[in-house]
Image: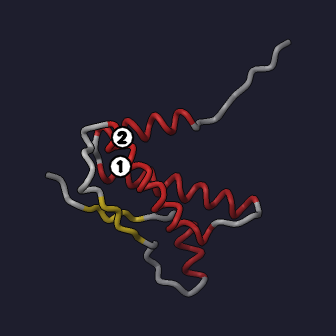
Amino acid sequence: MNRLTTLILFGSLTLTQQLALAGAPQDPPTMTVRYADLDLTKPAGAKALYVRVTQAARDVCSPLDGRDVARASRYKACVQKSTSDAVTKIDRPQLTAYAKEIAGAHGPVMQVARD
């Protein structure tokens, strides 16, 4: 069986730089996401783990959250990168497939103008 837990590094270069400016250590924050209780060969297990990873990313990236556009953009990028990095590190087919499905569902929307 795979490891019972995975240590996921969260944060982007921007988060690391901002925390360094605040006098924090150079290492980005980490959070352990436990998933031993999930069957990652099933879609439901993959979805549950994806939700846990995304919530952990939101928690760890929260110092970047803010009302202004620049901070909101950095926060969103941090959450997306952290989630993607975690999915890659866990490296389970069902989880990867679910993450790709979600990314496609929330991808850019383009409308074509009619003449």
Toward the viewer: 31 or 16?
Answer: 31
Q: Which element type, helix, strand or loop, lies under badge 2?
A: helix
Task: Give me the residue at 43% from left, 76% from top.
Answer: 27
Which quarter of the picture shows residue 112? Answer: top right
Q: Amino acid at mark 1?
A: Thr
Q: Judge from the rendering whether residue 25 lies leftward or rightward of residue 40; answer left or right.
A: right
**Residue reaching furthest right?**
115
Q: List x then y, in percent, for residue 115.
A: 86, 12
Q: Amino acid at mark 2?
A: Thr
Q: Judge from the rendering whether residue 3 lies leftward or rightward of residue 99; answer left or right.
A: left
Image height of 14 relative to 26, above or below: above
Give the residue pinned by disc 1.
88
Mark 2 vs mark 1, foreground winner is 2
Q: What separation in Å lies between label 2 and label 1 (alpha carbons)?
A: 7 Å
Which quarter of the picture shows residue 95? Answer: top left
Task: Give me the residue at 56% from left, 78% from top.
Answer: 19
Give the residue pinned by disc 2.
96
Q: Earlier in the sequence, mark 2 or mark 1?
A: 1
Toward the viewer: 67 or 45?
Answer: 45
